Image (tube, rainbow, N blue to C red):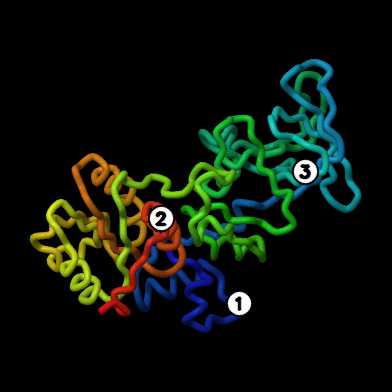
Amino acid sequence: MKLSLNWIKDYVKLPDDMDLSRLAYDLTMSTVEVEGAHDLAKDFENIIVGVICEVLPHPNADKLRVCRVDIGEGEIKDIVCGGSNLEVNQKVAVAVPGTFVKWHGEGEPVEIKVSKLRGVESYGMICASSEIGLFDLFPFEEEATIVDLTEERPRLLRPGGITPEELMAVLGDLVVDKAVTAQIDKDEVVKAPGMKYRHYAPSEPVVIVSGSREKAAAYIRSRFCEGDRVLCFEEELPLYEGCDPLSYGLERDAETLSAGLFAALRTLDETDVKTVYARCPVGGGVAYAVQNRLKKAAGFRVVDAEETV
């Protein structure tokens, strides 16, 4: 299980000088063993936001461009890039010399250096999301797509393994796209396939039932018909005996839910099901990403068992 440091701070007053290594040690000695602590900000050291001032043809390569990029404090640098979506005035993620990135998102990180690409000196690298660990937030279909940060405020298109809390800790600000929290029109043009209405959904209706375990089970049992299925947490399986329940993970461990949700939805889509009654986790972090995927599958149809007679 992963916990956000900001989430811990919501419940515990930590000393101002507390660092991650000391916190991990103190938790291990007093509460629970901590396997590791990861400072997300370190993954983005030497990665800055640049603004493309000009996009020029490369003299020796048709698929490359020479971008004149403002990297701050009045410095304009030439960076050779093969991105397919380069535009003037576009804000982009620039890995300056000394940064470590994953080339095309694969293999071990490599150090970026000032180098010549087909005869033109290039200062650093304009990055794709997969090269700096942000593919979940900025997905793309064409490999040559670079991260477009042109909006004044960073926008979360869909939550993933890097939680909104972790992004806020690094970026300081974050706009959550309306597609994350509510149904969008099926004809609306979206920036990522995962934002689409009922993405990854079974063909039959999905209804999320919120509330306590007991009241949710009572609601579902009172409406359960032959051919229906229940998608629930592993801890709740005994409550749905006789209702053909399917578990997709542990309620107390959101990462197991994240790992099991897609396979569970596919299983439900492969069987002759009338209605799926689903239980959804609450909270932030990875649980927030699971909520988003499951609510999309349900078309944001949620029933609160606490308020239903």
> Is residue 4 toward the left or the right of residue 1 in the image?
right
Q: CA distance from mark 2 to mark 1?
A: 45 Å
Quarter of the rendering occupied by the C terminus: bottom left
Q: Position of residue 91 (x, y in %)?
A: 76, 46
Q: Earlier in the sequence, mark 2 or mark 3?
A: 3
Quadrant in the picture for residue 52: top right
Tell me the amino acid under the disc marked 3: Gln
Q: CA distance from mark 2 to mark 3?
A: 34 Å
Residue position for label 1: 17
Camera-side residue of 239 and 174: 239
Quarter of the rendering occupied by the N terminus: bottom left
| Residue depicted at 24% across the width and 43% down the height | 267
Residue position for label 2: 299
Q: Position of residue 261 (x, y in %)?
A: 32, 51
In the depicted structure, whether residue 229 falls above or below residue 142? below
| Residue depicted at 42% across the width and 46% down the height | 199
Q: Are marks 3 and 1 in contact (CB under 8 Å)?
A: no
| Residue depicted at 37% across the width and 75% down the height | 29
Q: Earlier in the sequence, mark 2 or mark 1?
A: 1
Give neighbour class at mark 1: few <14, some 14-19, many 20+ (Cα, 10 Å): few
Residue position for label 3: 90
